Image (tube, helix red, strand yellow):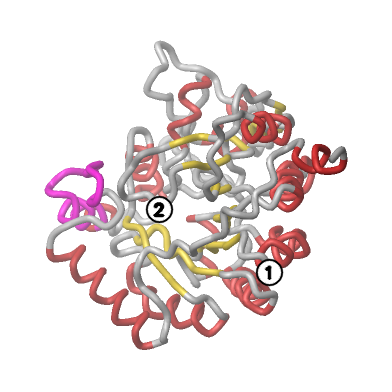
């Protein structure tokens, strides 16, 4: 195995691949620590100029989101947010999961956005890029601070996570759900413990995430499951097993996303295949290309998340059939939340003065 491709226990990437904007190689924090030292996590504050991101993508079921973190210690090799570290002149590989940036002024920036006269209340998704309940949240508490504002101002919010730390905030989520102000999607791409350890190394086990789904459902929080990504010849055989498990746990809907390989994610994923699945790496990429019109990745809206062609159609058919069998919805789930309750900052004080 080349020295550049070295798996580390608890890490997903096997290299410090340069970002696409690098004009020269930049030594990663892992390399600086020395060849025998395991890469350590470095947590750094990053003040946000604004906190709500907007998108107009027709295949994304929300148009605004918040990401309290940049980088993610969960280490999922397939994460489509990895290329964002290139903007910081850091590696989308090992740096993405060891150089974590958090936004301590996120609550302040959120209030700023809500105070603007022209603000229109629509549900905001937390966790569209990086996980809001990754390990750093235990230290920073940024996600909980944001949720406290959503509760105080009765603003609708959707959350996406694979972290069980969300249980800490069950009090806030139950309160919001009682007023139709929140929903949660739990990501679960594999039930195989050995595969999880190399595909999403610092993510809680599938059993723990199923318990979270169960607790959310019992607390009245609308909860769905996200099988993401489906990777050919890696976890595609698990579709039926996962759907059965999340349905039994209480998920009302399930959806899936086909493996996406934008920018630096493709070479990082191929390196990971060469290290962990050398005997089937060529077959995996052949199936990926079959579902992407002969390319490694088809980034067109409507195709990038499901693929196309016979293999992609077979996955879609299997997924729909599994959901029907277990009595849960199979289409892209977007719970309709109540936007009429929103109390803009300052409204409460104004009411006291009347």
Q: Is residue 33 above or below residue 156?
A: above
Q: Distance between the residues labelled 1 and 2?
A: 22 Å
- The answer, for residue 111, to whether it is visible in the render is yes
Q: Is residue 241 left or right of residue 212?
A: left
| Residue 265, image quadrant | top left
Nearer the observer, disc 1 or disc 2?
1
State the quadrant of the C terminus: top right
Q: Residue at x 48, y 55 (%)?
A: 199
Q: Nearer the viewer, residue 104 or 205?
A: 104
Dot 2, how many residues are within 10 Å of its Cα: few (below 14), some (14-19), or many (20+)?
few
Q: Which residue is drawn at 70% across and 75% down?
A: 219
Q: Residue furthest right?
A: 353
Q: Which mark is residue 139?
A: none
Determine whether label 1 and label 2 are within 8 Å by CB.
no
Give the labeled residue for mark 1. 178
| Residue 95, image quadrant | top right
Part of the protein shown in magenta: 284-303
| Residue 220, image quadrant | bottom right
Disc 1 or 2, which lies upstream in sequence? 2
* Magenta part, dominant SS: loop
State the quadrant of the N terminus: top left
Q: Is residue 254 above or below residue 70?
A: below
Give the labeled residue for mark 2. 61
Q: Nearer the viewer, residue 125 or 18?
A: 125
**Total of numbered circles in the picture?**
2
Rendered location of residue 312, percent (x, y): 21, 63
Q: In this view, does 252 lie to the left or right of 321?
A: right
């Amino acid at each position: 195995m080349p020295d550049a491709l070295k798996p580390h226990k608890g890490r997903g990437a096997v290299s410090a691949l340069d970002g696409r904007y690098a004009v020269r190689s930049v030594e990663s924090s892992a390399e600086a620590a020395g060849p025998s030292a395991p890469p350590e996590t470095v947590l750094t504050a990053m003040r946000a100029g604004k906190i709500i991101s907007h998108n107009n993508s027709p295949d994304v079921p929300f148009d605004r989101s918040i990401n309290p973190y940049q980088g993610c210690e969960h280490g999922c090799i397939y994460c489509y947010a990895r290329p964002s570290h290139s903007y910081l002149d850091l590696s989308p590989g090992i740096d993405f999961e060891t150089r974590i940036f958090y936004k301590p002024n996120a609550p302040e920036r959120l209030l700023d956005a809500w105070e603007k006269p022209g603000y229109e209340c629509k549900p905001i998704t937390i966790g569209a890029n990086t996980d809001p309940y990754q390990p750093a949240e235990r230290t920073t508490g940024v996600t909980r601070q944001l949720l406290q504002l959503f509760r105080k101002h009765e603003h609708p919010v959707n959350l996406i996570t694979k972290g069980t730390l969300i249980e800490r905030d069950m009090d806030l989520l139950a309160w919001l759900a009682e007023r139709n102000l929140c929903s949660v999607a739990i990501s679960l791409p594999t039930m195989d413990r050995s595969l999880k350890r190399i595909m999403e190394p610092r993510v809680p086990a599938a059993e723990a995430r199923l318990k979270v789904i169960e607790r959310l459902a019992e607390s009245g929080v609308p909860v769905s499951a996200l099988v993401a990504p489906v990777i050919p010849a890696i976890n595609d055989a698990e579709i039926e097993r996962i759907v059965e498990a999340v349905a039994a746990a209480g998920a009302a809907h399930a959806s899936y996303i086909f493996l996406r390989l934008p920018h630096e994610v493709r070479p990082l994923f191929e390196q990971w295949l060469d290290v962990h699945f050398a005997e089937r790496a060529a077959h995996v990429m052949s199936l990926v290309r079959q579902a992407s019109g002969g390319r490694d990745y088809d980034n067109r809206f409507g195709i990038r998340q499901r693929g196309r062609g016979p293999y992609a159609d077979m996955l879609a058919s299997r997924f729909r059939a599994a959901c029907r069998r277990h009595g849960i919805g199979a289409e892209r789930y977007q719970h309709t939340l109540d936007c009429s309750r929103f109390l803009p900052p300052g409204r409460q004080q104004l009411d006291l003065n009347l």
